[in-house]
Amino acid sequence: MLPKIFQPIEVGDLIRLGNKFDGGYVVSKSIFKKTKQLITFGLFDEFSFERDLKKKIPKLEVFVFDHTVNINFWIKNTFRWLLHFLRNGKNFLRIFRYLMYYNFFSKKKINHIKKKIISSKRKEPNSISINEIIKDYNIVCENCIIKIDIDLDEYRILDDLIKFNFLSIIIEFSHVDLHLDKVINFIKKNKKMSIIHVHGNNFDWPDENQNPIHLEITFLNNQLSKIGQKKSTQIYPIKGLDFQNDLKKPEINLKFSK
């Protein structure tokens, strides 16, 4: 069982944005009227969430930070995806992912910044902190969603993240089995926000306690949204909202301690 602190608050207007498999996340519809900006940490070749949110909010400004996605990335992976298709006859459309990327990020107010996200306590070449992003890109946190999927680097920026009053935060916590205390500490310190959705990423098998090793968690700002504090009685994953990240493996059923 997961500790009770992970059990979401009951919210009746949840919606999934992005793919039905890896890349999709669940948010509250209530934030659409207030949301004017989206910050994303981590891109690879998956931006279906950003695309769907932009459809819902046409005037949305999108800032995606990922220093690893460059021309070499696209050449290497397009060739790899082509070989995979020729061998297996699957994922034909992925060969054209660069064209999809170019089409989306060439639009107005859609920005891919090729910089690494780091803690404000550190300095590195070609890097940027949350503090600098908010200042340099005129971010209004109260009207901003932040989505984070950066493979363990999320733990390095949690202290920075908690300083700001974001409207909603979506984080995929990696290797929770090794960093459970850090996640719980973040949840406890982040008193202005409540968990409204949680999903176990099934790319890795569950740990010895049958808990997910990777957790996708959506937080909603208590002060900026009208939500109560009644714990959800939903069965997780939620049918119709949650889907397998890895289609070859079963979903991970979540239970919370009492």
Image (cartoon, grey):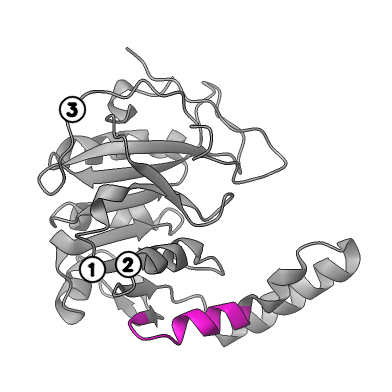
Quickly name the residue at label 1.
36
Q: Is 16 on the left or on the right of 190, as rendered?
A: right
Seen in the picture, residue 126 relative to 50 is either above or below; the reply is below
Q: Going by the image, does 156 lie left or right of 163?
A: right
Q: Amino acid at mark 1?
A: Lys
Residue 4, picture quadrant = top left
Residue 143 falls left or right of residue 41? left
Residue 83 in view, yes or no: yes
Residue 73 visible from this viewpoint: no
Query: Which residue type carries mark 3?
Result: Gln
Q: Quadrant of residue 139?
A: bottom left
Q: Which residue is mark 3?
A: 229
Bin the neighbour count of mark 2 within 10 Å (Cα to Cα): few under 14, some 14-19, many 20 and up.
Answer: some
Which residue matches tag 2? 57
Residues tagged 3 and 2 counted as in contact (Cβ below 8 A) = no
Camera-side residue of 194 and 239 = 239
What span is colored magenta in the figure? 98-110
**Three-letter amino acid code at disc 2?**
Ile
Comes first in the chain, label 2 or label 1:
1
- The residue most toward the top is 258
**Which numbered disc covers residue 249?**
none
Residue at 20% across, 65% down: 121
Q: Is residue 102 magenta?
A: yes
Image: 8 above or below 42: above
Task: Using the numbered discs, state the Cα–Cα distance from disc 2 to disc 1 in whole angstroms.
Answer: 8 Å
Q: Quadrant of the N terminus?
A: top left
Locate residue 247, reporting x and y percent.
68, 44
Whether tag 2 and tag 1 are in contact, CB under 8 A, the answer is: yes
**Relative image position of residue 110 (x, y in whole percent):** 37, 80
Mark toward the start of the polypeptide (3 vs 2): 2
Tell me: residue 100, above or below residue 237. Answer: below
Quadrant showing the C terminus: top left
